[in-house]
Image (spheres, rainbow, N blue to C red):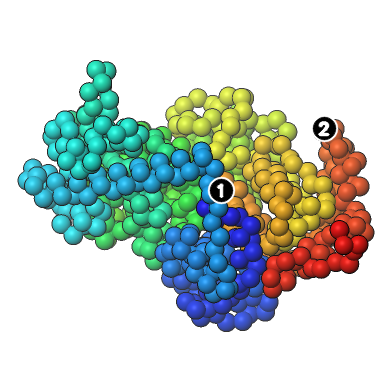
Protein backbone atom coordinates (compact mmCIF):
# COMPACT_ATOMS: atom_id res chain seq x y z
CA UNK A 1 0.00 0.00 0.00
CA UNK A 2 1.28 3.50 -0.86
CA UNK A 3 1.35 5.67 2.29
CA UNK A 4 -0.88 8.73 2.29
CA UNK A 5 1.94 11.00 3.46
CA UNK A 6 3.92 10.07 0.32
CA UNK A 7 0.96 11.11 -1.84
CA UNK A 8 0.96 14.48 -0.05
CA UNK A 9 4.71 14.88 -0.64
CA UNK A 10 4.51 13.79 -4.26
CA UNK A 11 1.77 16.27 -5.14
CA UNK A 12 3.75 19.07 -3.51
CA UNK A 13 6.83 18.26 -5.66
CA UNK A 14 5.30 18.09 -9.12
CA UNK A 15 3.56 20.79 -11.16
CA UNK A 16 0.22 19.81 -12.65
CA UNK A 17 0.73 22.32 -15.46
CA UNK A 18 3.74 20.32 -16.72
CA UNK A 19 1.83 17.04 -16.38
CA UNK A 20 -1.23 18.22 -18.32
CA UNK A 21 0.73 20.23 -20.91
CA UNK A 22 2.51 17.08 -22.09
CA UNK A 23 -0.82 15.71 -23.34
CA UNK A 24 -3.00 18.81 -23.72
CA UNK A 25 -1.20 22.03 -24.79
CA UNK A 26 -2.09 24.80 -22.36
CA UNK A 27 -2.21 28.57 -22.76
CA UNK A 28 -1.68 31.11 -19.99
CA UNK A 29 -4.84 33.03 -19.12
CA UNK A 30 -4.40 35.30 -16.12
CA UNK A 31 -3.36 33.31 -13.07
CA UNK A 32 -4.37 29.97 -14.66
CA UNK A 33 -3.88 27.93 -17.81
CA UNK A 34 -6.65 26.95 -20.22
CA UNK A 35 -7.32 24.56 -23.10
CA UNK A 36 -10.23 22.92 -24.87
CA UNK A 37 -11.32 20.09 -22.61
CA UNK A 38 -9.83 16.70 -23.49
CA UNK A 39 -12.84 14.94 -21.95
CA UNK A 40 -15.59 16.36 -24.17
CA UNK A 41 -15.92 18.14 -27.49
CA UNK A 42 -15.89 21.94 -27.38
CA UNK A 43 -14.72 24.89 -29.48
CA UNK A 44 -14.24 27.44 -26.69
CA UNK A 45 -11.81 26.49 -23.90
CA UNK A 46 -13.49 25.74 -20.60
CA UNK A 47 -10.77 23.46 -19.19
CA UNK A 48 -8.76 25.30 -16.52
CA UNK A 49 -5.58 24.25 -14.73
CA UNK A 50 -4.70 26.09 -11.53
CA UNK A 51 -0.99 26.18 -10.80
CA UNK A 52 -1.46 27.67 -7.34
CA UNK A 53 -4.02 25.07 -6.24
CA UNK A 54 -2.63 22.22 -8.36
CA UNK A 55 -5.92 20.95 -9.73
CA UNK A 56 -7.82 20.97 -13.02
CA UNK A 57 -11.49 21.64 -13.63
CA UNK A 58 -13.68 21.80 -16.73
CA UNK A 59 -16.55 24.25 -16.46
CA UNK A 60 -18.20 22.49 -19.39
CA UNK A 61 -18.36 18.81 -18.39
CA UNK A 62 -17.34 19.02 -14.73
CA UNK A 63 -14.19 16.87 -15.05
CA UNK A 64 -11.80 17.66 -12.21
CA UNK A 65 -8.90 16.32 -10.20
CA UNK A 66 -5.22 16.44 -9.36
CA UNK A 67 -2.23 15.41 -11.46
CA UNK A 68 -2.83 11.82 -10.35
CA UNK A 69 -6.47 12.07 -11.41
CA UNK A 70 -5.50 13.46 -14.82
CA UNK A 71 -3.19 10.53 -15.58
CA UNK A 72 -5.94 8.13 -14.52
CA UNK A 73 -8.78 9.82 -16.44
CA UNK A 74 -6.91 10.92 -19.58
CA UNK A 75 -4.19 8.29 -19.70
CA UNK A 76 -6.34 5.41 -18.46
CA UNK A 77 -3.77 4.48 -15.84
CA UNK A 78 -4.47 2.68 -12.59
CA UNK A 79 -3.79 4.63 -9.41
CA UNK A 80 -0.45 2.92 -8.57
CA UNK A 81 0.79 3.39 -12.16
CA UNK A 82 -0.10 7.09 -12.11
CA UNK A 83 1.75 7.54 -8.81
CA UNK A 84 4.79 5.66 -10.15
CA UNK A 85 4.96 7.86 -13.27
CA UNK A 86 4.77 11.09 -11.26
CA UNK A 87 7.30 9.79 -8.75
CA UNK A 88 9.79 9.10 -11.56
CA UNK A 89 9.31 12.65 -12.84
CA UNK A 90 9.96 14.01 -9.35
CA UNK A 91 12.96 11.75 -8.72
CA UNK A 92 11.24 9.96 -5.85
CA UNK A 93 10.96 6.30 -5.01
CA UNK A 94 7.50 5.08 -4.14
CA UNK A 95 7.54 3.56 -0.65
CA UNK A 96 5.37 0.61 0.27
CA UNK A 97 3.99 -0.23 3.69
CA UNK A 98 2.65 -3.55 4.86
CA UNK A 99 -1.09 -3.74 5.17
CA UNK A 100 -2.59 -4.57 8.52
CA UNK A 101 -3.76 -8.21 8.70
CA UNK A 102 -7.41 -7.37 8.08
CA UNK A 103 -6.59 -5.02 5.20
CA UNK A 104 -4.27 -7.56 3.59
CA UNK A 105 -6.97 -10.22 3.77
CA UNK A 106 -9.54 -7.90 2.19
CA UNK A 107 -7.14 -6.97 -0.60
CA UNK A 108 -6.24 -10.60 -1.27
CA UNK A 109 -9.92 -11.55 -1.27
CA UNK A 110 -10.74 -8.77 -3.75
CA UNK A 111 -7.95 -9.95 -6.06
CA UNK A 112 -9.16 -13.55 -5.81
CA UNK A 113 -12.77 -12.58 -6.55
CA UNK A 114 -11.67 -10.43 -9.47
CA UNK A 115 -9.68 -13.33 -10.94
CA UNK A 116 -12.63 -15.71 -10.61
CA UNK A 117 -15.05 -13.26 -12.24
CA UNK A 118 -12.64 -12.68 -15.13
CA UNK A 119 -12.25 -16.43 -15.62
CA UNK A 120 -16.05 -16.80 -15.62
CA UNK A 121 -16.43 -14.00 -18.19
CA UNK A 122 -13.93 -15.69 -20.52
CA UNK A 123 -15.69 -19.03 -20.03
CA UNK A 124 -19.12 -17.60 -20.86
CA UNK A 125 -17.77 -15.86 -24.00
CA UNK A 126 -16.23 -19.11 -25.18
CA UNK A 127 -19.46 -21.01 -24.55
CA UNK A 128 -21.44 -18.63 -26.74
CA UNK A 129 -19.66 -19.93 -29.85
CA UNK A 130 -20.99 -23.44 -29.17
CA UNK A 131 -24.55 -22.39 -28.31
CA UNK A 132 -26.53 -22.03 -31.58
CA UNK A 133 -29.76 -21.30 -29.69
CA UNK A 134 -28.11 -18.35 -27.93
CA UNK A 135 -26.58 -17.06 -31.18
CA UNK A 136 -29.95 -17.27 -32.93
CA UNK A 137 -31.56 -15.39 -30.06
CA UNK A 138 -29.03 -12.53 -30.32
CA UNK A 139 -29.37 -12.42 -34.11
CA UNK A 140 -33.13 -12.31 -33.69
CA UNK A 141 -32.68 -9.25 -31.51
CA UNK A 142 -30.70 -7.61 -34.32
CA UNK A 143 -27.24 -7.87 -32.76
CA UNK A 144 -24.06 -8.44 -34.75
CA UNK A 145 -21.04 -10.39 -33.60
CA UNK A 146 -19.01 -7.18 -33.37
CA UNK A 147 -21.36 -5.60 -30.83
CA UNK A 148 -21.62 -8.84 -28.87
CA UNK A 149 -17.81 -8.93 -28.68
CA UNK A 150 -17.63 -5.23 -27.71
CA UNK A 151 -19.82 -5.87 -24.66
CA UNK A 152 -18.25 -9.27 -23.89
CA UNK A 153 -21.61 -11.06 -24.16
CA UNK A 154 -21.52 -14.78 -23.41
CA UNK A 155 -23.70 -17.75 -22.59
CA UNK A 156 -24.11 -19.81 -19.40
CA UNK A 157 -24.76 -23.46 -20.40
CA UNK A 158 -27.92 -25.25 -19.29
CA UNK A 159 -26.24 -27.49 -16.72
CA UNK A 160 -25.74 -27.60 -12.96
CA UNK A 161 -21.97 -27.11 -12.70
CA UNK A 162 -20.53 -25.93 -16.03
CA UNK A 163 -18.18 -23.45 -14.28
CA UNK A 164 -16.30 -26.41 -12.80
CA UNK A 165 -14.46 -26.53 -16.13
CA UNK A 166 -13.29 -22.93 -15.77
CA UNK A 167 -11.90 -22.89 -12.21
CA UNK A 168 -9.32 -24.92 -10.33
CA UNK A 169 -11.49 -25.68 -7.30
CA UNK A 170 -15.27 -25.65 -7.68
CA UNK A 171 -15.63 -26.10 -3.90
CA UNK A 172 -13.70 -22.91 -3.11
CA UNK A 173 -15.81 -20.59 -0.89
CA UNK A 174 -14.74 -17.60 -3.01
CA UNK A 175 -16.99 -18.82 -5.84
CA UNK A 176 -19.98 -18.38 -3.57
CA UNK A 177 -18.71 -15.01 -2.31
CA UNK A 178 -18.35 -13.82 -5.91
CA UNK A 179 -21.97 -14.74 -6.59
CA UNK A 180 -21.12 -17.37 -9.19
CA UNK A 181 -22.14 -20.44 -7.20
CA UNK A 182 -25.04 -21.21 -4.85
CA UNK A 183 -24.94 -23.75 -2.02
CA UNK A 184 -28.22 -25.67 -1.74
CA UNK A 185 -29.88 -26.85 1.46
CA UNK A 186 -28.22 -30.25 1.15
CA UNK A 187 -24.82 -28.62 0.72
CA UNK A 188 -24.65 -29.43 -2.99
CA UNK A 189 -23.27 -26.50 -5.03
CA UNK A 190 -24.49 -25.39 -8.42
CA UNK A 191 -24.02 -22.47 -10.83
CA UNK A 192 -26.13 -19.39 -10.20
CA UNK A 193 -26.44 -18.66 -13.93
CA UNK A 194 -27.75 -21.42 -16.20
CA UNK A 195 -29.11 -21.25 -19.75
CA UNK A 196 -28.84 -17.46 -19.90
CA UNK A 197 -27.30 -14.80 -22.11
CA UNK A 198 -24.54 -13.34 -19.94
CA UNK A 199 -23.72 -9.64 -19.73
CA UNK A 200 -20.52 -8.87 -17.77
CA UNK A 201 -20.68 -5.77 -15.57
CA UNK A 202 -17.51 -3.65 -15.38
CA UNK A 203 -16.33 -1.10 -12.84
CA UNK A 204 -14.74 2.25 -13.71
CA UNK A 205 -11.39 0.51 -14.42
CA UNK A 206 -12.94 -2.03 -16.77
CA UNK A 207 -12.66 -4.96 -14.37
CA UNK A 208 -15.48 -7.52 -14.29
CA UNK A 209 -17.32 -7.20 -10.96
CA UNK A 210 -20.56 -9.06 -11.68
CA UNK A 211 -23.00 -10.38 -14.26
CA UNK A 212 -26.50 -9.97 -15.52
CA UNK A 213 -28.13 -13.01 -17.07
CA UNK A 214 -31.06 -12.78 -19.51
CA UNK A 215 -33.19 -15.88 -19.83
CA UNK A 216 -33.70 -17.37 -23.27
CA UNK A 217 -37.39 -17.32 -24.07
CA UNK A 218 -40.07 -16.73 -21.45
CA UNK A 219 -38.57 -18.05 -18.19
CA UNK A 220 -38.57 -16.26 -14.83
CA UNK A 221 -36.89 -14.21 -13.62
CA UNK A 222 -36.34 -12.50 -16.95
CA UNK A 223 -33.11 -10.92 -15.70
CA UNK A 224 -30.94 -12.41 -12.95
CA UNK A 225 -28.21 -10.22 -11.47
CA UNK A 226 -25.20 -11.02 -9.36
CA UNK A 227 -25.89 -10.55 -5.64
CA UNK A 228 -24.22 -7.85 -3.56
CA UNK A 229 -20.57 -8.83 -3.09
CA UNK A 230 -17.40 -7.14 -1.80
CA UNK A 231 -16.84 -5.97 -5.39
CA UNK A 232 -20.38 -5.33 -6.62
CA UNK A 233 -23.11 -3.01 -5.37
CA UNK A 234 -26.16 -2.38 -7.56
CA UNK A 235 -26.71 1.06 -6.08
CA UNK A 236 -23.25 2.24 -7.16
CA UNK A 237 -22.70 0.67 -10.59
CA UNK A 238 -24.21 1.24 -14.03
CA UNK A 239 -24.14 -1.31 -16.83
CA UNK A 240 -22.20 -0.12 -19.88
CA UNK A 241 -20.67 2.99 -18.29
CA UNK A 242 -17.06 1.92 -18.77
CA UNK A 243 -17.69 1.11 -22.45
CA UNK A 244 -19.74 4.25 -23.11
CA UNK A 245 -17.58 6.87 -21.32
CA UNK A 246 -15.96 8.33 -24.44
CA UNK A 247 -19.21 8.27 -26.43
CA UNK A 248 -21.00 10.05 -23.57
CA UNK A 249 -18.39 12.82 -23.54
CA UNK A 250 -18.55 13.20 -27.32
CA UNK A 251 -22.36 13.29 -27.36
CA UNK A 252 -22.61 15.62 -24.36
CA UNK A 253 -25.35 13.46 -22.87
CA UNK A 254 -26.14 10.00 -21.53
CA UNK A 255 -29.31 7.92 -21.86
CA UNK A 256 -30.29 5.84 -18.82
CA UNK A 257 -32.45 2.78 -19.55
CA UNK A 258 -33.61 -0.18 -17.50
CA UNK A 259 -32.29 -3.25 -19.36
CA UNK A 260 -28.97 -4.64 -20.55
CA UNK A 261 -30.41 -5.52 -23.93
CA UNK A 262 -31.65 -1.96 -24.36
CA UNK A 263 -28.06 -0.69 -23.92
CA UNK A 264 -26.65 -3.17 -26.42
CA UNK A 265 -29.45 -2.66 -28.98
CA UNK A 266 -29.11 1.12 -28.85
CA UNK A 267 -25.33 0.82 -29.28
CA UNK A 268 -25.94 -1.49 -32.26
CA UNK A 269 -27.91 1.33 -33.89
CA UNK A 270 -25.38 4.07 -33.10
CA UNK A 271 -26.82 5.37 -29.83
CA UNK A 272 -23.73 4.30 -27.95
CA UNK A 273 -23.99 6.81 -25.09
CA UNK A 274 -26.35 4.61 -23.07
CA UNK A 275 -26.17 2.93 -19.65
CA UNK A 276 -28.60 0.87 -17.56
CA UNK A 277 -29.41 0.54 -13.89
CA UNK A 278 -28.88 -2.92 -12.46
CA UNK A 279 -32.31 -4.05 -11.41
CA UNK A 280 -32.75 -1.16 -9.02
CA UNK A 281 -34.06 2.40 -9.12
CA UNK A 282 -31.70 5.20 -10.06
CA UNK A 283 -29.75 6.21 -6.94
CA UNK A 284 -28.08 9.52 -5.98
CA UNK A 285 -24.69 7.85 -6.51
CA UNK A 286 -25.67 6.90 -10.06
CA UNK A 287 -26.64 10.49 -10.82
CA UNK A 288 -23.47 11.93 -9.29
CA UNK A 289 -21.35 9.56 -11.39
CA UNK A 290 -23.09 10.58 -14.58
CA UNK A 291 -22.98 14.33 -13.91
CA UNK A 292 -19.23 14.02 -13.44
CA UNK A 293 -18.79 13.15 -17.11
CA UNK A 294 -21.69 14.95 -18.83
CA UNK A 295 -24.10 17.85 -18.42
CA UNK A 296 -27.28 16.13 -19.61
CA UNK A 297 -28.85 12.92 -18.31
CA UNK A 298 -31.77 11.48 -20.29
CA UNK A 299 -33.93 9.07 -18.29
CA UNK A 300 -35.76 6.74 -20.65
CA UNK A 301 -38.83 4.89 -19.34
CA UNK A 302 -41.91 3.13 -20.63
CA UNK A 303 -44.92 5.40 -20.89
CA UNK A 304 -47.11 3.27 -18.61
CA UNK A 305 -47.88 3.89 -14.94
CA UNK A 306 -44.91 1.78 -13.77
CA UNK A 307 -42.60 3.79 -16.01
CA UNK A 308 -43.84 7.09 -14.64
CA UNK A 309 -43.38 5.89 -11.06
CA UNK A 310 -39.82 4.84 -11.89
CA UNK A 311 -39.26 8.26 -13.45
CA UNK A 312 -40.53 9.92 -10.28
CA UNK A 313 -38.04 7.99 -8.17
CA UNK A 314 -35.29 9.05 -10.56
CA UNK A 315 -36.43 12.66 -10.22
CA UNK A 316 -36.27 12.48 -6.42
CA UNK A 317 -32.75 11.13 -6.49
CA UNK A 318 -31.60 13.61 -9.14
CA UNK A 319 -32.75 16.83 -7.49
CA UNK A 320 -29.94 17.02 -4.89
CA UNK A 321 -27.26 16.44 -7.56
CA UNK A 322 -28.50 19.14 -9.93
CA UNK A 323 -26.42 22.25 -10.40
CA UNK A 324 -27.06 25.17 -12.70
CA UNK A 325 -25.84 24.04 -16.12
CA UNK A 326 -26.66 20.38 -15.42
CA UNK A 327 -29.85 19.02 -16.99
CA UNK A 328 -32.05 16.00 -16.44
CA UNK A 329 -34.79 15.17 -18.94
CA UNK A 330 -37.38 12.40 -19.12
CA UNK A 331 -38.17 10.44 -22.25
CA UNK A 332 -41.39 8.37 -22.16
CA UNK A 333 -41.74 5.77 -24.89
CA UNK A 334 -45.06 4.81 -26.50
CA UNK A 335 -47.03 2.24 -24.49
CA UNK A 336 -45.85 -1.30 -24.97
CA UNK A 337 -42.45 -0.41 -26.43
CA UNK A 338 -39.03 -0.48 -24.82
CA UNK A 339 -35.87 1.19 -26.24
CA UNK A 340 -34.80 -2.03 -27.93
CA UNK A 341 -38.14 -2.35 -29.78
CA UNK A 342 -38.29 1.33 -30.68
CA UNK A 343 -34.80 1.68 -32.16
CA UNK A 344 -35.07 -1.57 -34.16
CA UNK A 345 -38.40 -0.51 -35.69
CA UNK A 346 -37.69 3.16 -36.31
CA UNK A 347 -33.91 3.62 -36.23
CA UNK A 348 -31.42 5.99 -34.63
CA UNK A 349 -32.80 9.25 -36.04
CA UNK A 350 -36.28 8.61 -34.67
CA UNK A 351 -34.95 7.70 -31.22
CA UNK A 352 -32.72 10.76 -31.07
CA UNK A 353 -35.72 12.81 -32.11
CA UNK A 354 -37.46 11.58 -28.96
CA UNK A 355 -34.42 12.66 -26.94
CA UNK A 356 -34.64 16.16 -28.40
CA UNK A 357 -38.30 16.36 -27.36
CA UNK A 358 -37.82 14.86 -23.89
CA UNK A 359 -39.48 16.55 -20.91
CA UNK A 360 -37.17 18.67 -18.73
CA UNK A 361 -37.11 17.78 -15.05
CA UNK A 362 -38.67 21.12 -14.05
CA UNK A 363 -41.67 20.56 -16.34
CA UNK A 364 -42.11 16.95 -15.22
CA UNK A 365 -41.99 17.99 -11.57
CA UNK A 366 -44.59 20.75 -11.82
CA UNK A 367 -46.81 18.82 -14.23
CA UNK A 368 -47.04 15.81 -11.92
CA UNK A 369 -47.62 17.89 -8.80
CA UNK A 370 -50.24 20.01 -10.59
CA UNK A 371 -52.04 16.88 -11.77
CA UNK A 372 -52.19 15.65 -8.18
CA UNK A 373 -53.17 19.03 -6.70
CA UNK A 374 -55.27 20.85 -9.28
CA UNK A 375 -54.66 24.61 -8.90
CA UNK A 376 -58.29 25.39 -9.74
CA UNK A 377 -59.23 26.28 -6.17
CA UNK A 378 -57.54 28.06 -3.28
CA UNK A 379 -57.27 24.76 -1.46
CA UNK A 380 -55.70 23.10 -4.50
CA UNK A 381 -53.19 25.89 -4.93
CA UNK A 382 -52.27 25.72 -1.23
CA UNK A 383 -51.78 21.94 -1.51
CA UNK A 384 -49.63 22.45 -4.62
CA UNK A 385 -47.29 24.85 -2.79
CA UNK A 386 -47.08 22.49 0.19
CA UNK A 387 -46.27 19.56 -2.11
CA UNK A 388 -43.66 21.51 -4.10
CA UNK A 389 -41.89 22.98 -1.06
CA UNK A 390 -39.81 19.91 -0.04
CA UNK A 391 -38.72 19.29 -3.62
CA UNK A 392 -37.59 22.86 -4.22
CA UNK A 393 -35.77 22.71 -0.89
CA UNK A 394 -33.55 19.95 -2.27
CA UNK A 395 -32.20 22.00 -5.17
CA UNK A 396 -28.60 23.14 -4.98
CA UNK A 397 -29.03 25.04 -8.25
CA UNK A 398 -29.96 28.64 -7.29
CA UNK A 399 -30.85 29.82 -10.80
CA UNK A 400 -33.05 26.81 -11.56
CA UNK A 401 -34.67 27.12 -8.12
CA UNK A 402 -35.49 30.79 -8.80
CA UNK A 403 -37.04 29.94 -12.18
CA UNK A 404 -39.10 27.13 -10.62
CA UNK A 405 -40.37 29.52 -7.93
CA UNK A 406 -41.46 31.92 -10.66
CA UNK A 407 -43.30 29.11 -12.48
CA UNK A 408 -44.95 28.03 -9.23
CA UNK A 409 -45.96 31.62 -8.50
CA UNK A 410 -47.64 31.80 -11.92
CA UNK A 411 -49.50 28.53 -11.29
CA UNK A 412 -50.75 29.52 -7.84
CA UNK A 413 -51.29 33.24 -8.33
CA UNK A 414 -49.11 34.05 -5.30
CA UNK A 415 -46.69 36.99 -5.43
CA UNK A 416 -43.19 35.61 -5.84
CA UNK A 417 -41.89 37.38 -2.72
CA UNK A 418 -44.68 35.86 -0.61
CA UNK A 419 -44.11 32.44 -2.16
CA UNK A 420 -40.40 32.65 -1.35
CA UNK A 421 -41.23 33.30 2.31
CA UNK A 422 -43.59 30.33 2.42
CA UNK A 423 -41.03 28.04 0.82
CA UNK A 424 -38.38 29.06 3.34
CA UNK A 425 -40.53 27.57 6.08
CA UNK A 426 -39.30 24.15 4.94
CA UNK A 427 -35.97 24.99 6.57
CA UNK A 428 -37.60 25.17 10.00
CA UNK A 429 -40.11 22.36 9.93
CA UNK A 430 -41.38 21.56 6.46
CA UNK A 431 -41.72 17.99 5.30
CA UNK A 432 -39.55 16.15 2.84
CA UNK A 433 -40.81 13.88 0.11
CA UNK A 434 -40.94 10.20 0.91
CA UNK A 435 -38.45 8.38 -1.30
CA UNK A 436 -39.90 6.02 -3.83
CA UNK A 437 -43.35 7.66 -3.91
CA UNK A 438 -44.92 7.57 -7.33
CA UNK A 439 -46.95 10.38 -8.92
CA UNK A 440 -50.23 8.64 -8.01
CA UNK A 441 -49.33 7.93 -4.38
CA UNK A 442 -50.73 9.91 -1.45
CA UNK A 443 -49.40 13.24 -0.19
CA UNK A 444 -46.04 12.86 1.64
CA UNK A 445 -46.15 12.38 5.37
CA UNK A 446 -44.54 14.72 7.91
CA UNK A 447 -41.84 12.29 8.96
CA UNK A 448 -38.23 12.91 7.97
CA UNK A 449 -36.38 10.52 5.71
CA UNK A 450 -32.63 9.91 5.62
CA UNK A 451 -31.37 10.01 2.06
CA UNK A 452 -28.08 9.11 0.42
CA UNK A 453 -27.23 12.77 0.31
CA UNK A 454 -28.97 15.21 2.62
CA UNK A 455 -31.07 17.62 0.63
CA UNK A 456 -31.40 20.56 2.99
CA UNK A 457 -29.27 23.51 1.98
CA UNK A 458 -26.38 24.16 4.34
CA UNK A 459 -25.42 27.66 5.52
CA UNK A 460 -22.99 29.43 3.22
CA UNK A 461 -20.70 29.91 6.21
CA UNK A 462 -19.92 26.18 6.26
CA UNK A 463 -18.95 26.32 2.58
CA UNK A 464 -16.70 29.29 3.41
CA UNK A 465 -14.98 27.27 6.13
CA UNK A 466 -14.49 24.40 3.68
CA UNK A 467 -12.91 26.79 1.17
CA UNK A 468 -10.55 28.23 3.76
CA UNK A 469 -9.48 24.82 4.97
CA UNK A 470 -8.93 23.49 1.44
CA UNK A 471 -6.68 26.42 0.60
CA UNK A 472 -4.90 26.42 3.99
CA UNK A 473 -5.17 22.82 5.24
CA UNK A 474 -2.32 23.18 7.76
CA UNK A 475 -4.42 25.70 9.71
CA UNK A 476 -6.45 22.77 11.01
CA UNK A 477 -3.63 22.14 13.46
CA UNK A 478 -3.66 25.71 14.74
CA UNK A 479 -7.38 26.56 14.74
CA UNK A 480 -10.02 24.51 16.55
CA UNK A 481 -12.63 23.82 13.86
CA UNK A 482 -16.31 22.97 14.35
CA UNK A 483 -17.54 19.51 13.33
CA UNK A 484 -21.16 20.21 12.29
CA UNK A 485 -23.64 17.45 12.99
CA UNK A 486 -26.52 19.10 11.16
CA UNK A 487 -27.08 16.19 8.77
CA UNK A 488 -26.20 18.22 5.67
CA UNK A 489 -23.75 17.19 2.99
CA UNK A 490 -21.72 20.36 3.56
CA UNK A 491 -21.62 19.82 7.32
CA UNK A 492 -20.47 16.22 6.93
CA UNK A 493 -17.80 17.28 4.42
CA UNK A 494 -16.46 19.98 6.76
CA UNK A 495 -16.30 17.52 9.66
CA UNK A 496 -14.44 14.92 7.57
CA UNK A 497 -12.10 17.56 6.16
CA UNK A 498 -11.32 18.98 9.59
CA UNK A 499 -10.65 15.49 10.99
CA UNK A 500 -8.27 14.56 8.18
CA UNK A 501 -6.31 17.82 8.20
CA UNK A 502 -6.01 18.07 11.98
CA UNK A 503 -4.79 14.48 12.36
CA UNK A 504 -2.17 14.63 9.61
CA UNK A 505 1.38 14.64 10.93
CA UNK A 506 2.82 15.89 7.64
CA UNK A 507 2.53 19.18 5.74
CA UNK A 508 -0.58 19.28 3.56
CA UNK A 509 -1.33 20.81 0.18
CA UNK A 510 -4.63 21.60 -1.47
CA UNK A 511 -4.02 18.96 -4.15
CA UNK A 512 -3.05 16.36 -1.56
CA UNK A 513 -6.22 16.94 0.43
CA UNK A 514 -8.39 16.80 -2.69
CA UNK A 515 -6.71 13.55 -3.76
CA UNK A 516 -7.41 12.00 -0.35
CA UNK A 517 -11.16 12.51 -0.78
CA UNK A 518 -11.39 11.31 -4.40
CA UNK A 519 -14.15 8.71 -4.63
CA UNK A 520 -15.60 9.58 -1.23
CA UNK A 521 -19.10 10.86 -0.55
CA UNK A 522 -17.58 14.28 0.20
CA UNK A 523 -15.74 14.72 -3.11
CA UNK A 524 -18.46 16.68 -4.92
CA UNK A 525 -18.95 19.14 -2.04
CA UNK A 526 -15.22 19.79 -1.70
CA UNK A 527 -14.75 20.27 -5.44
CA UNK A 528 -17.71 22.66 -5.66
CA UNK A 529 -16.20 24.72 -2.85
CA UNK A 530 -12.77 24.70 -4.48
CA UNK A 531 -14.13 25.72 -7.87
CA UNK A 532 -16.10 28.51 -6.21
CA UNK A 533 -12.91 29.71 -4.51
CA UNK A 534 -11.23 29.70 -7.91
CA UNK A 535 -14.08 31.73 -9.41
CA UNK A 536 -13.79 34.24 -6.60
CA UNK A 537 -9.98 34.37 -6.96
CA UNK A 538 -9.52 33.75 -3.23
CA UNK A 539 -5.83 33.76 -2.32
CA UNK A 540 -4.25 31.57 0.34
CA UNK A 541 -3.77 34.59 2.56
CA UNK A 542 -7.42 35.61 2.21
CA UNK A 543 -8.46 32.01 2.88
CA UNK A 544 -6.59 32.01 6.20
CA UNK A 545 -8.31 35.23 7.26
CA UNK A 546 -11.72 33.95 6.16
CA UNK A 547 -11.22 30.67 8.00
CA UNK A 548 -10.30 32.24 11.33
CA UNK A 549 -13.06 34.83 11.11
CA UNK A 550 -15.54 32.18 9.97
CA UNK A 551 -14.83 29.94 12.96
CA UNK A 552 -15.69 32.79 15.33
CA UNK A 553 -18.86 33.59 13.39
CA UNK A 554 -19.91 29.94 13.42
CA UNK A 555 -19.81 29.71 17.21
CA UNK A 556 -21.52 33.08 17.63
CA UNK A 557 -24.35 32.02 15.34
CA UNK A 558 -24.64 28.69 17.15
CA UNK A 559 -24.95 30.44 20.51
CA UNK A 560 -27.57 32.88 19.19
CA UNK A 561 -29.55 29.94 17.76
CA UNK A 562 -29.42 28.18 21.13
CA UNK A 563 -27.64 25.12 19.74
CA UNK A 564 -25.24 23.16 21.97
CA UNK A 565 -21.81 24.73 21.62
CA UNK A 566 -19.63 22.75 23.98
CA UNK A 567 -16.09 24.10 23.68
CA UNK A 568 -17.25 27.16 21.75
CA UNK A 569 -15.34 29.59 23.94
CA UNK A 570 -12.14 27.61 23.55
CA UNK A 571 -12.69 27.33 19.80
CA UNK A 572 -13.29 31.04 19.43
CA UNK A 573 -10.11 31.77 21.35
CA UNK A 574 -8.23 29.26 19.23
CA UNK A 575 -9.39 31.06 16.09
CA UNK A 576 -7.05 33.88 17.06
CA UNK A 577 -3.71 32.35 16.10
CA UNK A 578 -1.09 32.73 18.85
CA UNK A 579 2.53 33.67 18.08
CA UNK A 580 3.57 30.08 18.82
CA UNK A 581 0.95 28.73 16.40
CA UNK A 582 1.99 31.27 13.77
CA UNK A 583 5.58 30.04 14.10
CA UNK A 584 4.38 26.44 13.79
CA UNK A 585 2.52 27.30 10.59
CA UNK A 586 5.59 29.09 9.25
CA UNK A 587 7.74 26.02 9.87
CA UNK A 588 5.15 23.74 8.28
CA UNK A 589 5.16 25.95 5.19
CA UNK A 590 8.98 25.80 5.07
CA UNK A 591 8.83 22.01 5.25
CA UNK A 592 6.27 21.90 2.47
CA UNK A 593 8.37 24.11 0.19
CA UNK A 594 11.76 22.58 0.98
CA UNK A 595 13.18 20.38 -1.81
CA UNK A 596 13.84 17.48 0.54
CA UNK A 597 10.69 17.67 2.61
CA UNK A 598 12.80 17.64 5.77
CA UNK A 599 12.17 19.92 8.70
CA UNK A 600 14.46 22.98 8.82
CA UNK A 601 17.33 22.87 11.25
CA UNK A 602 16.75 24.76 14.51
CA UNK A 603 19.15 26.07 17.08
CA UNK A 604 18.95 24.40 20.47
CA UNK A 605 20.80 22.79 23.33
CA UNK A 606 21.53 19.61 21.46
CA UNK A 607 18.53 17.70 22.76
**Dot 2 lies on which element?**
loop
Which residue sits at x=56%, y=60%? 95
Which residue in the structure is indicated by mark 1? 520
Residue 362: image location, x then y, percent: 52, 47
Which residue in the structure is indicated by mark 2? 564
Which residue sits at x=87%, y=40%? 568
Q: Residues within 10 Å of mark 1 (few under 14, many from 20)?
A: few
* The C terminus - image quarter: bottom right
Q: Residues within 10 Å of mark 2 (few under 14, many from 20)?
A: few
Which residue sits at x=46%, y=71%? 38
In the rendered view, would you say 327 is above or below 562?
A: below
Residue 432: image location, x then y, percent: 60, 32
Residue nearer the viewer, 595 or 146: 595
Residue 426: image location, x then y, percent: 68, 35
Dividing the picture into quadrants, the one containing residue 324 is bottom right
In the rendered view, would you say 190 is above or below 203?
A: above
- Examine the rendering and report whether any part of residue 392 can be seen: no
- Left or right of 426, for residue 308: left
- Examine the rendering and report whether any part of residue 132 can be seen: yes
Please report whichever mark, 2 or 1, sits nearer to the chain's N-terminal start.
Answer: 1
Amino acid sequence: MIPNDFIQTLLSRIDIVDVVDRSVPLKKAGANYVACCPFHSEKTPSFTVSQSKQFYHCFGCGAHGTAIGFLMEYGGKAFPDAVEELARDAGLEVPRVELRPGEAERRDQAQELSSLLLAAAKFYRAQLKDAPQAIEYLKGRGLTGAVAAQFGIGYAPDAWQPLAAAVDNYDAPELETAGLVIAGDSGKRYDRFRDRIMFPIHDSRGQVIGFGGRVLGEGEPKYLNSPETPLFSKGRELYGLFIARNAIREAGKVVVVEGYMDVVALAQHGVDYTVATLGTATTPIHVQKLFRITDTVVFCFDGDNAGRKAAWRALENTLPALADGKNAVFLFLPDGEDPDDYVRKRGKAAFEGLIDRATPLSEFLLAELSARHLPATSEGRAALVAAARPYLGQLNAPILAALLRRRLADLTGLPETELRTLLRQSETGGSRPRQGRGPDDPQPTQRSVTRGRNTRRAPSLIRELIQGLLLQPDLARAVTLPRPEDGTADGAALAALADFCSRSEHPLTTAGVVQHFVGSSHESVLMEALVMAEDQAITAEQAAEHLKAGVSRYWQQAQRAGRPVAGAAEAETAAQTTPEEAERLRQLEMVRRSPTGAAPATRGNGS
